[in-house]
Image (cartoon, rainbow, N blue to C red):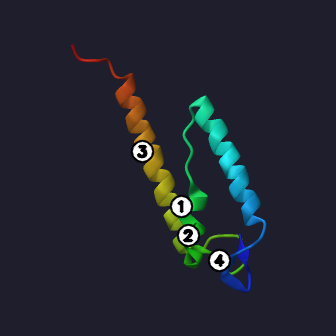
Amino acid sequence: MREKDDLQQLIERTERVKARNAIAGEIMKKVGTQTNDLFGLVEQHPERQSTDGVHFNGKGNEALAKQVAKQVAESVAENLSSASPSKK
């Protein structure tokens, strides 16, 4: 989240988000579940944030959607290739 009056600045609570994301990432790694770092995608891009400092604008939503679609496609392709019978 960003300061409403200065979208260049992340709000103080962002550090808690980073810490929680790191904890969740470690848990997911231990159980073998992929994660998609959407925070990292927008962290350095205030131009993707709406003027309320919380939600994303059209550019932000488009970037998020592209990354999610890419990761889903890669995951599907990976799972299909690992599920296909091996050729002998």
Expressed as whole percent of the image width and height from the top left, the position of residue 24 reads 68, 44
Task: Give neighbour class at mark 3: few <14, some 14-19, many 20+ (Cα, 10 Å).
Answer: few
Q: Residue at left 38%, top 37%?
A: 77
Q: Residue at left 56%, top 53%?
A: 37
Q: Residue furthest left?
A: 88
Q: Are marks 1 and 2 in contact (CB under 8 Å)?
A: yes
Expressed as whole percent of the image width and height from the top left, the position of residue 32 reads 56, 31
Q: Are marks 2 and 4 in contact (CB under 8 Å)?
A: yes
Q: Are marks 3 and 2 in contact (CB under 8 Å)?
A: no
Label 3's element? helix
Q: Are marks 4 and 3 in contact (CB under 8 Å)?
A: no
Real-space Cα distance between discs 2 and 4? 8 Å
Q: Which mark is residue 64?
A: 1
Q: Is residue 53 visible?
A: no
Label 1's element? helix
Taking 79 as reference, is 63 above or below it?
below
Residue bearing mark 3? 73
Taking 52 as reference, is 23 above or below it?
above
- In the rendered structure, which amino acid carries the disc numbered 3? Ala
